[in-house]
């Protein structure tokens, strides 16, 4: 089975002369491989101003994506914190409910014992005829 050809071909002289911008092109999330290859192919015939503009666009894309990632990582972290807080509240709520249930059962048991004692006292305290 033949090995697939590399998706992007970079001539050595282009890599040597434009290595930094080629790295930006390869890292660009807004391009597919066909577009990356196009920009790499035309780099040698672009004017310095065009290369500078392309670099500026790619740098801008990179910084904007980094800012978006940072923003969403904070939001994800905040959501994670909110989830932890929600879970802790749920645990507390369940503990309070269990405690109230236990207290209610204890009170009912005490009331039953009190009633039993009162009945016993009434029965024992009644004079026999």
Image (cartoon, rainbow, N blue to C red):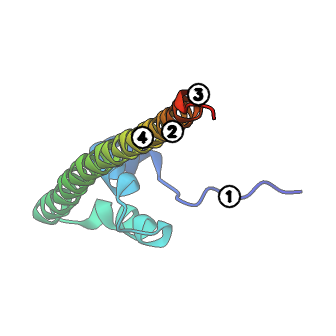
Please identify the quadrant where the N terminus is shown. bottom right
Q: Mark 3 Cα within 10 Å, few/some/many (few <14, many 20+)?
A: few
Of circles 3 and 4, the one toward us is 3
Residue beneath label 3, please?
124
Q: Residues within 10 Å of mark 1 (few under 14, many from 20)?
A: few
Residue at which label 1 appears: 5
Query: Do the residues bearing badges 2 and 3 touch, measured as CB atoms within 8 Å?
Result: no
Which label belongs to residue 115? 2
Q: Which is nearer the N-term, disc 3 or disc 1?
A: 1
Question: What distance separates the C-alpha of mark 2 from that of mark 3?
Answer: 14 Å
Query: Marks 3 and 4, how far apart in space?
Result: 49 Å
Q: Give me the disc on residue 91.
A: 4
Residue 22 left/right relative to 106: left
Q: Earlier in the sequence, mark 2 or mark 3?
A: 2
Distance in Å between CA atoms under marks 1 and 4: 56 Å
Q: For the residue labelled by badge 2, is the local secondary structure a helix, a strand or a loop?
A: helix
């Amino acid at each position: 089975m033949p090995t697939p050809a590399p998706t992007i071909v970079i001539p050595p002289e282009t890599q040597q002369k434009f290595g930094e911008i080629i790295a930006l092109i390869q890292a660009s999330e807004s391009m597919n491989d066909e577009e990356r290859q196009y920009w790499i192919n035309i780099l040698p015939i672009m004017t310095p101003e065009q290369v500078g503009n392309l670099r500026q666009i790619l740098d801008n894309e990179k910084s904007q994506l980094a800012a978006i990632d940072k923003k969403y990582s904070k939001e994800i972290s905040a959501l994670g914190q909110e989830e932890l807080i929600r879970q802790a509240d749920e645990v507390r709520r369940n503990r309070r409910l269990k405690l109230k249930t236990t207290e209610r059962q204890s009170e009912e048991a005490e009331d039953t014992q009190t009633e039993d004692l009162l009945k016993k006292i009434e029965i024992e305290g009644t004079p026999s005829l």
